[in-house]
Amino acid sequence: MMICRESFWTTVDGKSELIREGRTLVSEDSDIYLRFPEKFMEAEAQYRSDVEQATAAPGERRVVKV
């Protein structure tokens, strides 16, 4: 995945679209990336420690408050 490093406007399917710095993610085979590769960089995976895991791991039991 590639992330935008410089905001810009472009036309996608006949509509103007804002491609936002640090927010817009595209794949390396997308039309936008192929047209403007200089405006993107490889996205780094981000880990958030403040988000609780939604499900138990295999074999793990979770306490449910009733």
Image: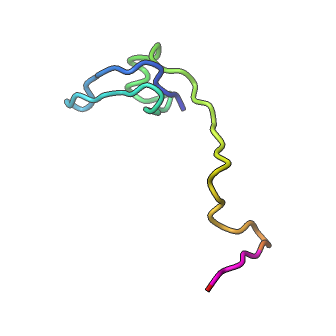
Query: In the rendered view, would you say 56 is above or below 38?
Result: below
Is 51 on the left or on the right of 24, as rendered? right
Q: Is residue 28 left or right of residue 8?
A: right
Tell me the magenta residue range. 61-65
Task: Where is residue 52? Give x, y as percent.
Answer: 64, 59
Q: Quadrant of residue 11?
A: top left
Question: Quadrant of the rendered structure where residue 59 is?
Answer: bottom right
Residue visible at 46% across and 24% down?
4
At x 49%, y 32%, the residue is 27
Q: Quadrant of residue 14?
A: top left
Quarter placement of the C terminus: bottom right
What x and y, as percent, mark residue 32? 38, 25
Q: Main secondary structure of the magenta part?
A: loop
Furthest residue toward bottom: 66
Q: How is the image coloured?
A: rainbow
Q: How many marks?
A: 0
Q: Residue furthest left?
A: 14
Looking at the picture, how far across and down is residue 9, in whole percent? 29, 22
Name above or below for residue 45 compared with residue 16. Answer: below
Left or right side of 41 for 47? right
Q: Is residue 27 left or right of residue 8?
A: right
Residue 33, percent from left and from top: 43, 23
Q: Nearer the viewer, residue 6 or 50?
A: 50
Q: Quadrant of the N terminus?
A: top right
> For the point 71% across and 68% down, which residue is it?
56
Asked if the magenta segment contains residue 34, the reply would be: no
Above or below — where is 65 with respect to 13?
Answer: below
